[in-house]
Image (cartoon, rainbow, N blue to C red):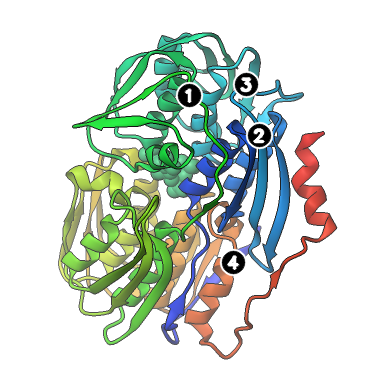
Amino acid sequence: MASLTSKKLKSIPAEITVPGDKSISHRSAMFAGLAKGTTIIDGFLPSEDCLCTVHAMQALGATMEPLEEVEGVGLVKLAITGNGMKLKAPEKPVDCGNSGTTIRLLSGILAGQDFKTELFGDASLSKRPMKRVADPLGQMGAKITGQGEKICAPLTIEGSALKSIYYKLPVASAQVKSAILLAGLYAAGKTTVVEPVATRNHTERLFSHFGIKWLREDDCVSVYGGQEPKANDITVPGDISSAAFWMVAAAASPGSQITLKNVGLNPTRTGIITVLLRMGAQVTNSETHSEGEPRGNITVRGGDLNATVIGGAEIPNVIDELPILAVAAALARGKTLIRDASELRVKETDRIAAVASNLRLMGVTVTEHPDGMEIEGGAKLHGATLPCYGDHRIAMAFLVAGMFAEGTTTLEGAECISTSYPGFERHLDLFLNGDAGARPIPVVSSVPQPLVDKMNRDKS
Ligand SMILES: O=C(O)C1=C[C@@H](OP(=O)(O)O)[C@@H](O)[C@H](O)C1
Ligand SMILES: C=C(OP(=O)(O)O)C(=O)O
């Protein structure tokens, strides 16, 4: 198993451009595969998770042409050609890898097909609850079966002619909301999802981009069935959830400054900026583009961080950033409380238990609660050999923690980082060793044949 090592940080680079947004890349590939005609996706995130979505859409009848690759990162520009909303039955079970977004959103799309599909994933995905999508999609008329009470993968999805529903989400989840809205496109009439707390709205924004009408009234999001996405080229902004690691590294380094270039600034995702500001970092953003998915540069100036409380309606907005915010809390003065975040227990691993255990191994006092944790900031961190629990966000968060610890910190099983951040190691190196060893990242515009073969592998 690959391990990655971190040590005291040498310098904060002036600028970093993180790869494309994961949520938007998944959805772009799905919508493009449902549209008749060709959509060019630029700034695509070629992470393991998003490639699973591309392979799935290929297995369901869409075609994909690779257009541009960045060395050490992967395919960042591709063309997807769909044949409309009616997909082709796949020849074999569809592999969703480690990706909750892939399996849950695809379930919504497959609920409206006239065939049966099997979806499976890796050991981590197979433990995550799919009942949250099986229940509403079942009410719409699809037949979804899975393993045990939580209806875990492998799932079988037997699509049918769907009926629309009015559904109150029992948990704040953009994946569940999106699965229902996607199924709503296949249902007669108006499908409405009521959110207990607002979650990321990329599906809605992409509906607009692909010409699908939807409406938001208070806490309700609705879509009418019978609409079909229209192919429309898209440029994906950088992922604020990936930028978060470097934002915290800079925020906790008084006197330093970093600019994260071309990051998505959708207000349903920028909670990390609010939290870091509250903790005492200086954070500014300059929006360069406000249509569709807003984007721009984020500049963080480090300072002495103070403890805070993170909870309530803020949680869905920082859900994937909580591991690295817990690291920020360990570096801050005072006791930070994270609450209302029990959803962290059903991610790639139990992120409350994993963060608490790894922080303790580095010398931090942490009290675990069912829905969060209390972190005593200000202790001197010491390096340690830590597990990732197969979770990319745990791996990256603790490699950043290692930059503030005495000695070295080793994350075992760090290959899981490719789930969301190809090229992470090269960026980490800029912090640990400075610019000296860095090479410019070449863009290869004609994609090498082995990659073309790899990308087309699942078509057969
Ligand atoms: O819709 C999405 O793209 C996502 C929603 C969130 O999950 P939940 O919907 O389970 O909260 C988030 O944790 C995940 O990384 C991506
Ligand atoms: C939870 C995550 O993703 P997913 O649910 O798509 O596996 C994540 O990226 O942190």
Which quadrant holds the N terminus?
bottom right
- Pick whichever, 283 or 216, lies toward us: 216
Q: CA distance from mark 1 to mark 4?
A: 38 Å
Mark 2 or 4: the one toward you: 2
Indicate the secondary structure of the residue bearing disc 2: strand
Q: Is residue 171 left or right of residue 311?
A: right
Residue 10 location in percent, x, y?
A: 45, 87
Name the residue carrying label 1: 227
Taking the spot 65% from the left edge, 13% from the top edge, the residue there is 115
Taking the spot 65% from the left edge, 23% from the top edge, the residue there is 87
Residue 339 visible to the viewer: no
Indicate the secondary structure of the residue bearing disc 4: loop
Q: Residues within 10 Å of mark 3 (few under 14, many from 20)?
A: some
Q: CA distance from mark 4 to mark 3?
A: 36 Å
Mark 4 or 3: the one toward you: 3
Indicate the secondary structure of the residue bearing disc 3: loop
Q: CA distance from mark 2 to mark 3?
A: 10 Å
Taking the spot 48% from the left edge, 54% from the top edge, the residue there is 21
Who comes first in sequence, dot 1 or dot 3?
3
Residue 136 visible to the viewer: yes
Q: Are marks 1 and 3 in contact (CB under 8 Å)?
A: no
Q: Which mark is residue 82?
A: 2
Q: CA distance from mark 1 to mark 3?
A: 12 Å
User: What is the three-letter code of the residue carrying label 4?
Assistant: Gly
Name the residue carrying label 3: 86
Farthest residue, direction bottom: 436
Who comes first in sequence, dot 2 or dot 4?
2
Name the residue carrying label 4: 423
